[in-house]
Each structure stands twice: as structure tokens, then as C-alpha cells.
Amino acid sequence: MNEDAFQAVYDRTARPLWAYLLRVSGRRDVADDLLQEAYCRFFVRNPPGLDEAQTRSYLFRIATNLLRDRWRHHEDEADEEQWSEISAGETDQAARVDVRRVMQNLKPRERQLLWLAYVEGMNHTEIASATGLSAISIRLLLFRARRRAAGLLNPEKTGTMVKK
């Protein structure tokens, strides 16, 4: 892959990939580091013959594996200040507080699945490809993540307790 081709791929995919890494990890520094590492690995591997959708999926798979490696080493802790920074772009104060609270209380895998499905607009097959899980598992895990997020947004209605 020449420099121009790599730059074109980067321009099309960097922003959504960084946003995904930020929301799942909860830390800007982690998102920056993992984004850089994902593109380094992509460039070194130089996978031939991928179309745009396959390239996007491949990059999300690399990023997901990097996140998973980070979780294995227990380096995924984010504090309140970092979550506040993430939500700073939200326009509605109440929505910002709700998003921050929900994201803080979801497990990393739940944040990951919800982000890929609802922000990136990936279907179950694409999410499975990006995460290394089966499409059938994605359906169930996504259902559980949605239910948990809904419980965190409205604990009185669902009886879900929000941890402080």
C-alpha cells in the first residue's frame, strides 16, 4: 500500500475508529494510543484486496483486539473527569449526564457492542467480524447490553440498581 492509498483509508476511517475507542475505553489517551497502534498494524500487515467495508471491519477488529489486550492487563479504568470530557460535546445537559452515567456503569464489552451497533451502524455479522464473536452471540449480548443500559437510564421502571 502506498502512502496516498493509506492516507485515503485513514481519512475515511480514523474519526469513527477513534470515537469507538474513546467511548469503549473511556480515556482520550488510550483512544489516541490504540488508534495509532491499530493503523501501524494495518499498514504493516497490508492486507491485499479489501474493499472499503472490509477495510473498515478489519480496522475495527484490530482496535477491538487491542482493547481486549488492554482489558486483560487491567488498564481500562477511567475516572469521572475523563468521562466528563467525553460527554462535553453533547448539546443537552441532561443527556450528557445520562450518557456519562450509563457509560460508566456498563461493562467494556457492553459499551463496545452498543457503540458498534448504534453509532457505527454495524449489523450483527459486522459486529461479529469486528469482535471475533459469533453473530448469534452478538444478538444475545447486544440484547443484554440494551436491557442493562435501559435499566441504568430508568432504574425505577426496571428495578435495576445503579452502582455509585
Image (cartoon, rainbow, N blue to C red):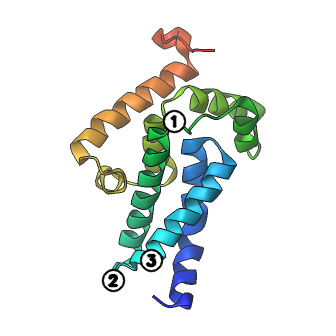
Q: Is 79 displayed left or right of 136 in the figure?
A: right
Does 1 sit above or below residue 31?
A: below
| Amino acid type at image mark 2 | Pro
Query: Looking at the picture, how far across and down is residue 100, in whole percent?
Result: 66, 32
* Residue type at numbered disc 1: His
Residue under the point 43% across and 52% down: 64
Relative to 161, is 46 on the left or the right?
left
Q: Residues within 10 Å of mark 1 (few under 14, many from 20)?
A: few
The image quarter in which residue 72 lies: top left
- According to the picture, the residue beneath numbered tag 1 turns out to be 74
Q: Nearer the viewer, mark 2 or mark 3?
A: 3
Figure quadrant of the C terminus:
top right
**Residue 2 on image: x %, y %:** 50, 91
Residue corresponding to mark 2: 48
In the image, 99 versus 76, the foreground residue is 76
User: Dot 3: few (<14), some (14–19), or many (≥20) neighbours within 10 Å?
Assistant: few
Which residue occupies 39% across, 76% down?
A: 45
Residue at image point 43% right, 67% down: 56
Q: Which residue is mark 3?
A: 44
Give the Cα separation between the discs numbered 2 and 3: 12 Å
